[in-house]
Amino acid sequence: MALPVAFFAVFFAYPVAAITARGLKSDGTWRFGRIWDVLAQPDIRHVLWFTTWQALASTALTLLIALPGAYVFARFDFRGKQVLRAVVTVPFVLPTVVVGTAFLALLGRGGLLDELWGVRLDTTVWAILLAHVFFNYAVVVRTVGGLWSQLDPRQEEAARMLGASRFAAWRRVTLPALGPAVAAAALMVFLFTFTSFGVVQILGGPTFSTLEVEIYRQTSEIFDLSTAAVLTLVQFAAVGAILAVHAWTVRRRETALRLVDAASTARRPRGAGQWALLAAVLATIAVLLVLPLAVLVERSLDAPGLGYYRALTSDEGGLFLVPPIDAVGNSLRYALAATAVALVIGGLAAAALTRRDAGRLVRGFDALLMLPLGVSAVTVGFGFLIALDEPPLDLRSSWILVPLAQALVGVPFVVRTMLPVLRAVDGRLREAAAVLGASPWRVWREVDLPMVRRALLIAAGFAFAVSLGEFGATVFIARPDNPTLPVAVARLLGRAGELNYGQAMALSTILMVVCAVALLALERLRIGLRSDRTGEF
Amino acid sequence: MLKLDGATVRFGGRAVLDAVGLDVAEHEIVCVLGPSGSGKSTLLRAVAGLQPLDGGRVFLDGRDLDGVPAHKRGVGLMFQDHQLFPQRDVAGNVTFGLRMHGEPKQRRAARVEELLTLVGLPDAHGRAVSSLSGGEQQRVALARALAPRPRLLMLDEPLGQLDRSLRERLVAELRELFGALGTTVLAVTHDQGEAFALADRVVVMRDGRIAQSGTPLEVWQRPADAFVARFLGFENVSAATVTGEAADTPWGKVPVPAGSRQGEVTLLVRPAGVRLVPAGQGLACTVAARTFRGTHVAVRLQPEGAPRLEAACALRDAPETGEEVGVAFDAAEIVVLGGGAAA
């Protein structure tokens, strides 16, 4: 417990405090009145209103579209499922900037739909909403589907035998069991869309602006740090309130679930209805998730002889001190380090939160852990830059700075993924181990760890992917001679010219491939583990 | 060797264990018997260190266990539904406690071998826990609990989920096994048959208190009160006024053994003490129901204006439902509850 707390104190609370002080404090005195001054501005109020309703709409739309997908992935067995699972997850790890650009290429001026039917959505809010669904589809499928696949189908069968219709059985038995996972997923989606940055920046144009975009604008364009700080505090408060409500609902609904091996719950679809559902989900994935990526790849190849890719290996553009291709190695190194840190910190925190005798203080930490997700990544990066650049903590020139920021964003994923499964482990198994002489630490290692290995791997995958795609914080602290992939993409996109645009497309295609490979390896690892355990039985 | 002194556990103000005092001697098999909710599982958890006490003390071999965590108490606990580790095979489960106690690898293998043979599953090492039948799981759980040689072995509803014939066979096996190993055992169950077959001494619990403690024979013959009697399955329990060698009951005058406690008492009439006589004699009753019990027939009789009576009849003497019969009472099968003056 002490380690996660210290980690968050130094790398989260301290930088945020630093930036807040810099924003709100002038000439050595606090000026809290500024909060009301800022909030009174009509355009700021408009931003707040838009931020909230687009997040709600995005969350509802994502749940609507992704829950059938979660069901299909949890309960159906079909050819290519593993690959498809990875495909679904890839969008989530793409830098927001790239997603925005891919949707622009699909829905915007001169985009695919424009070319085919003259349809343009980039001036409407639908482009933003669809991009958010694109992004968060995996959150729902992974979080809800992961638990769903481990729920014992016989629970529903028992309800059917008691006279419940198929739907009633699902609603009364499965849905309540899924409740915490659905709530967790919805919360994540809401937070991501509430703090959406890159997507809104590109697709929103001048009409639509979220809090995050506004903070960035105030910080980097208007250099009005105190307004940015006030907006950060507002976002902080809103996110804190949401998290508190969420922690409360989760605690109320916490139940020990009967978990079974996921391999035993999936069946081949039966009957026209189930095949139709599978087909519908596959079609949704194809149109919503694959098509934008396909357009992205197509644009990256839109030069003779892989011209855009070859341009990546030269440093003649002068945009970077190194060839853009070096960003691949940087990103992988940073992401590995960030994953390790996130797993250690998140794992310890999740274990501490699972203890039955966890007090209020510890449980409050649960909500605190989610804060880095809610507070803007821009703020984290900027806070890092201004807080950790002087003794005793001068990390500005250290390579560890980037992984630390990325881990900060990754930890909540680790905790969120591990906690539902850890909490569902039957407490008496731990007691059985204790009575047999296992100390609390060994109980965790011998009982919890083997049971949550799946969740741990998923968490690792998420942390890795998030680190690879992290942009908002990294953009502030990555050194010019060591750019990460998303940072390099963003810089290329920021430059005019067809070659830069094409290179950005090529580089994001590479990022996409790296993520896909990492996730596929993860899926393999999971299958290997499972057959290893059950072996010849 | 195990001693509980005023052990108290409260859940939200309600005492689940209410100042329980209990002694278990070396090599003794004590069975705590009680309905669900009587606090018997909590008793085991308190001894195991899984449930902190709100009052009182637990001593093992004279050592106060206060503040000693579960994994350092050196007691074994077999859980109600076994709680085998699903991700380990049979050998992995049995060897778990040995690993926790730092036993060297070779000794562990030998011990697993020995234990699996002991519980009658010599070839089960590599089997997955999920492939075991209920009885096999129970045996593995037993082997796992015995492996670290606990000073005290506790069993929570050890045979609860098994079918009847298996249960009867296993209970005999368990008793034999514990006798041979000299294990000190504290078991809890809601099944009196199991308790009587397994235990040297039976402790009946009610609402967190000990209602009676004694050998199976003592408890069976002289239940301490109406609760114990009814829990043991006796239904002919009633308030009565004893004068001399007769008692005034709702069923009329009933003879009681010589030397019974006088005055207001609770009376138990065993089914065997309810004798059927031709209609017109004794207490007039109608046969309300009859249940075949293998060796005898349990007949439920409805007297006029009095509680029902249960009688045990030989097969061929059992009357049909609806028949009118008379009832006479046999003093030898009638007990004044609450430790009357009688020897």
Image (cartoon, coloured by chain):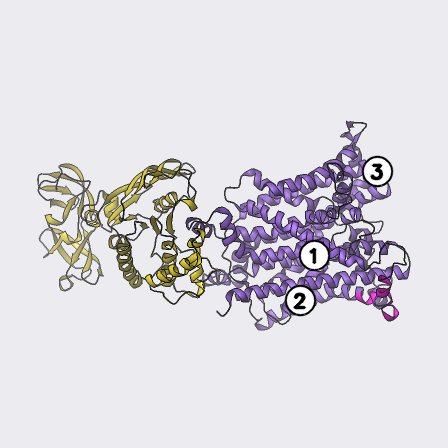
Chain colours: A purple, B yellow
Q: Name the chain letter of the residue that bears numbered label 1.
A: A
> What type is the residue that disc 3 sits on?
Asp
> What type is the residue that disc 2 sits on?
Leu
Give the image location of residue A342, x and y in percent.
65, 50
Q: Which span is picked out in magenta?
A: A297-314
Please tell me the numbered disc located at residue A465: 1
Relative to B223, residue A181 above or below: below
Of callouts 3 and 1, which one flags the residue occurring earlier in the amino acid sequence? 3
Of callouts 1 and 2, which one flags the residue occurring earlier in the amino acid sequence? 2
The answer to if B202 sits in the magenta stretch is no
**Callout 2: helix, strand or loop?**
helix
Give the image location of residue A305, x and y in percent.
86, 71
Q: Is residue A432 left or right of residue A485?
A: left
Please tell me the numbered disc located at residue A84: 2
Of callouts 2 and 3, which one flags the residue occurring earlier in the amino acid sequence? 2
Please tell me the numbered disc located at residue A224: 3
Q: Is residue A150 left or right of residue B301?
A: right
